[in-house]
Image (cartoon, rainbow, N blue to C red):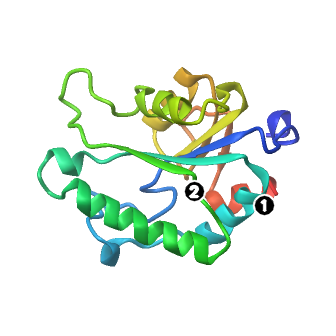
């Protein structure tokens, strides 16, 4: 990772997936309210560390549970308000959260690996330069999203077969490298 981590400054943007990167993923299910939301170890502190280094921190998350009728947009927004409050309590910040409610089967959907959410972030924050951006995720689609947008990719997980510019065990480990 030395090839890009030494160049990171306040002109860089950090894109983060949510489920499986920030909070525990519910296998075969969805996090639908704050009671079911559990940060992965060290994540609020890691985001606080990233907040000192990156100009923008953006969360991009597929939330097809909305499209399936298992939760509403309001449920997701309440959950995100809770998450942001806990991150801010640790001294961190998130500049924006983009989520896609579409089903995988919907034609022309906004889901990752498509870069709709990246382009929306860049429209809202024109200073975002994808060549000075990192996408951290725990899936193949997250890595494809980052590559399609021209970002550096960091796989946060244990599956070594996923292709990325760097592999870490999670955000806490990444924060130890990028500080």
- Please tell me in which quadrant of the rendered image residue 169 appears: bottom right
| Residue 82, horizontal then vertical, whole percent | 42, 72
Q: Residue drawn 30% across and 64% down?
A: 31
User: Which callout, 2 or 1, points at the residue further toward the start of the chain?
Assistant: 2
Residue matched to label 1: 176
Residue occupying image coordinates x 61% and y 30%: 126
Q: Is residue 107 left or right of residue 177?
A: left
The front one of 60 and 147 is 60
Q: Secondary structure at mark 1?
A: helix
Above or below, comparing residue 101 to residue 79 in the picture: above
Give the mark count. Answer: 2
Q: Which mark is residue 94?
A: 2
Query: Which numbered disc covers residue 44?
Result: none
Question: Residue at the spot x=60%, y=67% of the render?
Answer: 43
As measured in the structure, the alpha-carbon distance from the residue carrying label 2 to the one carrying label 1 is 19 Å
Q: Is residue 119 left or right of residue 45?
A: left
């Amino acid at each position: 990772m030395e090839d890009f981590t030494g160049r990171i400054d306040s002109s860089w943007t950090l894109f983060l997936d949510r489920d499986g990167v920030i909070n525990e993923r519910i296998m075969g299910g969805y996090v639908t309210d704050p009671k079911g939301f559990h940060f992965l170890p060290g994540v609020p502190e890691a985001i606080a560390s990233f907040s000192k280094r990156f100009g923008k921190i953006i969360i991009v998350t597929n939330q097809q549970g909305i499209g399936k009728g298992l939760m509403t947009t309001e449920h997701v927004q309440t959950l995100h308000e809770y998450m942001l409050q806990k991150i801010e309590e640790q001294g961190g910040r998130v500049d924006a959260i983009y989520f896609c409610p579409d089903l995988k089967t919907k034609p022309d959907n906004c889901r990752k690996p498509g870069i709709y959410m990246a382009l929306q972030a860049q429209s809202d924050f024109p200073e975002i330069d994808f060549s000075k951006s990192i996408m951290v995720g725990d899936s193949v689609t997250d890595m494809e999203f980052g590559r399609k947008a021209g970002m550096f990719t960091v796989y946060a997980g244990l599956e070594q077969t996923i292709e990325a510019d760097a592999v870490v065990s999670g955000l806490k480990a990444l924060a130890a490298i990028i500080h």
